[in-house]
């Protein structure tokens, strides 16, 4: 085997459908350290297909850390062992020759497994659709400085808007709580003047759907922040709680 290749053992969760039992299946692969994690899975699938075997189902789209679809738990961590990146930004150089890599889907009651490593995350879309938007008629594009917003406030809103909706926070949380996701979506509007008119309606509707979708409660372990590929801060959860309290006492 070439010296600059990594020889790896993969233990991959295989599950035919939501109602089938799943289990880990072992594969051996030799891969360049320069490959991305998803390219490594592409190589594995090419090999499986060349032998008329069922390829491993996994999700990806942009492969640039933006779309939030490449959800894998790698070595027990959502998006793998490197902080603040999505799975598609993870490279094989972060693993050692001879290593065994465990690859699983995001696990949460609200994320049923569709097949192998793909889970259904429409629960997050339903929360967003409940109020994560601004419904005022904005008319034509205003001048850039027509609504003055302090740089610090704009930066905080921008940091919250960096959430890509991947659901790693849910997978990392022992309660499968979606509080980090929902609080990022609430915060990106709550901080800006355009988001103020619907602030109470928004937070109440989004929290209601979050609860209905079966996500658990937050117990302040901060596991969500530690595993978030976009570094979303738990201070957004505190802001969402304040917004929710204000909505209830208004
Ligand atoms: S808060 Fe972070 S981990 Fe949770 S959905 Fe958004 S980007 Fe993913």
Image (cartoon, helix red, strand yellow):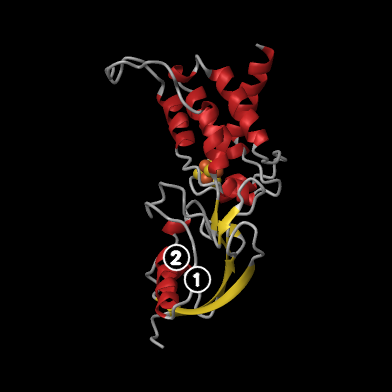
**Image quarter (top left, top right, bottom left or bottom right) of the C terminus:** top right
Mark 1 and mark 2 lie on one chain; the one further toward the N terminus is 2
Disc ID at residue 184? none
Question: Image quadrant for the N terminus?
Answer: bottom left
Residue farthest to the top, as pictured:
250
Q: Which residue occupies the foreground of this view, 22 or 168? A: 22
Relative image position of residue 226 (x, y in whole percent): 59, 49
Q: Tell me if mark 2 has few (under 14), some (14-19) or many (20+) residues whose alpha carbon lies within 10 angstroms of its own.
A: many
What's the residue at 69%, 13% (across, down)? 249
Q: Which mark is residue 37?
A: 2
Can you tell which mark lies on residue 95? 1
Looking at mark 1, is its residue's CB closer than 8 Å to ligand 1?
Answer: no
Asked whether the viewer can see residue 233, the reply is: no
Going by the image, does 62 lie left or right of 105? left
Of badges 1 and 2, nearer the viewer stands 2
Q: Nearer the viewer, residue 20 or 43?
A: 20
Q: Residue at x 45, y 61 (%)?
A: 90
For the question of whether residue 35 can be seen, the reply is yes
Of residues 232 and 50, the one nearer the viewer is 50
Question: How far apart, in angstroms, are the residues tagged by discs 1 and 2?
Answer: 10 Å
Q: Position of residue 201 (x, y in %)?
A: 57, 19
88 horizontally vs 101: left or right: left
């Amino acid at each position: 085997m070439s010296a600059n290749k990594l020889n790896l053992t993969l233990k991959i969760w295989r599950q035919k459908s939501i109602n089938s039992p799943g289990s880990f299946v072992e594969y051996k692969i030799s891969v360049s350290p320069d490959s991305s994690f998803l390219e490594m899975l592409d190589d594995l699938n090419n090999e499986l297909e060349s032998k008329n075997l069922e390829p491993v189902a996994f999700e990806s789209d942009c492969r640039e850390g933006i779309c939030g679809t490449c959800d894998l738990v790698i070595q027990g961590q959502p998006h793998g062992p490197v902080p603040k990146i999505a799975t598609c930004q993870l490279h094989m150089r972060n693993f050692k020759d001879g290593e065994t890599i465990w690859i699983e889907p995001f696990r949460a009651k609200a994320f049923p497994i569709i097949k192998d490593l793909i889970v259904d995350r429409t629960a997050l879309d339903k929360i967003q659709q409940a109020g994560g938007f601004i419904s005022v008629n904005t008319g034509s594009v205003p001048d850039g400085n027509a609504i003055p917003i302090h740089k610090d406030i704009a930066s905080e809103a921008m940091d919250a808007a960096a959430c890509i909706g991947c659901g790693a926070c849910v997978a990392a949380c022992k309660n499968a709580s979606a509080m980090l996701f929902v609080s990022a979506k609430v915060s990106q509007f709550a901080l800006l003047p355009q988001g103020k008119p619907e602030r109470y309606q928004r937070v109440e509707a989004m929290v209601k759907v979050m609860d209905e979708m079966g996500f658990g409660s937050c117990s302040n372990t901060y596991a969500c922040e530690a595993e978030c590929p976009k570094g979303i801060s738990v201070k957004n959860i505190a802001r969402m709680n304040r917004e929710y309290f204000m909505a209830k006492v208004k």
